[in-house]
Image (spheres, grey):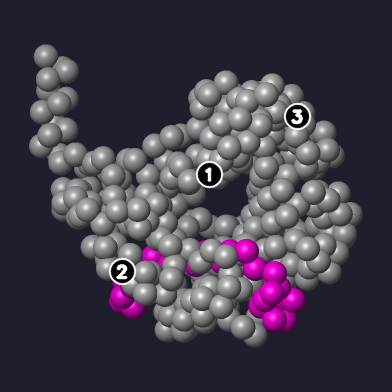
Amino acid sequence: MNKNYAICTFPFNAAQISMQGDVYVCCPPWSSNYTFGNIYEQPFDEIWNGERAQEFRRQFINNNYKYCKLDLCVKDCAQKIVPSEIVKKPKTFIFCYDATCNVKCIFCRSCHQKQDLSYFNEHMDEIISNMLENAENVVLSGVGEALFSPHSRKLIKHIAEMFPNIKFSLISNGILCDEKNLRELGIIDKLLSITVSLHAIKKETYDKLVKNGDFNKVMENLKFLSNLKRQGKLDRFILNFVVTAYNYREMADYIKMAEKIDATVGFLELLELETNENVYKELNIVDENHPKYNDFVKVMKNPIFRSGKCTINDTMLNLKPIGFIKSLKNKFLK
């Protein structure tokens, strides 16, 4: 099919391995948890161009995003490509199966199960040599802290040695994102992007949200990463901020802080996932039943959120005050 137009590239270029071994192309809640297959049940070659993969790509080729939660998507992944149902192995590989972490965010998984990573450890060379033969970029981790986990550190070193041209993108809480760790792993000159998940600009807010964290160390490391970006050693420097009832009033100032260190900002809606139900209810400021919901709506009227200085989903951008919602409901109930 010879089409060339802006389309989401993830189904054609990216593969993501989950904690259970499932293969996704996007954050599972954003893509209806649609999986291409499981690496413990099938060889990756069969999964990547299997029927489920082709079916998923077919929807995108036909401009049908039925599997996508478009209200959650930040829509920054469209490019002009010639799409096909069958494609080469992914250019971007996202390893987010290792949940080992050095901190505990209160809205993260309510219980940390001990993982058995022995299969990956025993077959690491075999796994990565097969999967990464077409890869240009490897992303870690999204579910834990790759710079803390002995397994993920070993994985990074192996990839850097086996595929010297691959670039790395790290998703980190920032505590270990310093020169010493990046040099030890052999990737300080192989960085494409670093995303720091930092959900506050005030220490007291950070300490409420992140247990066993180190706010001062993170802020120190942000300066180091900013210098890497300005020296041309880091293509993208991103700050991710999960919006909650504890931190929403810091959002505008967070953007201004990010500008000073040459970082871009991504605001993410809190997802329930495995979060404790009571914690989720307390923190989910996007819920119209939350006692601070209307105040959040006022905060989101700030034009800075529509200025192009951050990415944010449509749900948070288009919130209506509770009085408007009730009147709308009453109108349709009559």
305, 44: nearer the viewer: 305
Separation of residues labelled 2 and 3 (CA atoms): 43 Å
Pinpoint residue 274: horizontal percent, then vertical percent: 49, 49
Question: What residue type is disc 1 on?
Answer: Cys
Q: Are marks 3 and 1 in contact (CB under 8 Å)?
A: no
Q: Residue at x 69, y 34 (%)?
A: 36
Pinpoint residue 115: horizontal percent, then vertical percent: 69, 58
Pinpoint residue 244: horizontal percent, then vertical percent: 32, 57
Question: What residue type is disc 3 on?
Answer: Ile
Asked if one can make out residue 175 in the rendered structure from this viewpoint, the answer is: no
Q: Are marks 2 and 3 in contact (CB under 8 Å)?
A: no
In primary-sequence order, the first of circles 3 and 1 is 1
Magenta-drawn segment: 182-205
Q: Which mark is residue 2?
A: none
Q: Residue at x 74, y 76 (%)?
A: 186
Question: What residue type is disc 2 on?
Answer: Lys
Asked if one can make out residue 215 in the rendered structure from this viewpoint, the answer is: yes
Dot 1: few (<14), some (14–19), or many (≥20) neighbours within 10 Å? few
Dot 2: few (<14), some (14–19), or many (≥20) neighbours within 10 Å? some
Magenta-drawn stretch contains 200: yes
Separation of residues labelled 2 and 1 (CA atoms): 24 Å
Mark 2 sits on what residue?
256
Mark 3 sits on what residue?
86
Q: Residue at x 19, y 50 (%)?
A: 301
